[in-house]
Image: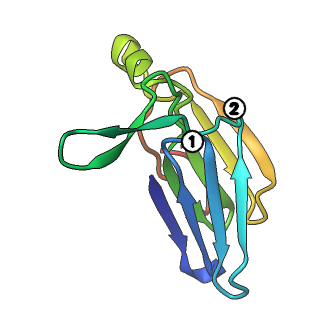
Amino acid sequence: GSVGVFPDANYVVLAQVSTDSFEIIDLKTQEITKVIGPMKQELKYSVEFDGKQNFPYLNPNMKNGYNQVFTDKNGIFLVYMGRSDEEISKSGIMSKDIFVFDFNGVPLIHYKLDRSIKALSVDSDSRRIY
């Protein structure tokens, strides 16, 4: 997953790649807010044995969740994949969606892009996304 830290606001955001969820940790209150969606996909896996040890085997048809997180004073910006590894490999498209949330986990904006991205950065003053 990806970690976004915004020290001025006292928040840490942990984004998950294997599921479409992320957690917002308020460092002042120690409260954790978990946001699930947009697909609300459960983690699908089986426990396999390779002759030496058990390990989790993730279902290869699962859609990937959040690839990257960026936090600033304006909120939480997440690059959302919504595609399986096979779909990404075949199409070459990593992500065309950016979701923006406030620090309470409330969705603010959903950007649908006309090109694929892997990561982003945001100018906090102009709100320009790079």
Question: Image height check: is 16 above or below 27?
Answer: above
Question: Crowdedness of circle 2 by 10 Å Cα count: few (<14), some, many (20+)?
Answer: few
Residue toward you, 112 or 123: 112
- Tag on residue 60? none
Residue at x 69% of width, y 62% of height: 74
Residue toward you, 108 or 58: 58
Q: Position of residue 66 (x, y in %)?
A: 53, 43
Residue toward you, 51 or 38: 51
Disc 2 residue type? Answer: Met
- Tag on residue 19? 1
Disc 1 residue type? Answer: Thr
Question: For residue 26, which quarter of the picture?
Answer: bottom right
Which residue is the extreme one toward the top? 90
Q: Position of residue 10 (x, y in %)?
A: 63, 81
Judging by the rendered image, the residue that carries numbered circle 2 is 39
Question: Image height check: is 67 above or below 33?
Answer: above
| Labels in figure, total | 2
Q: Position of residue 67 (x, y in %)?
A: 47, 43
Residue at x 62% of width, y 54% of height: 22
Q: How is the image coloured?
A: rainbow
Question: Image height check: is 53 above or below 111?
Answer: below
Q: Position of residue 37 (x, y in %)?
A: 71, 40
Q: Secondary structure at mark 1?
A: loop
Residue at x 66% of width, y 42% of height: 99
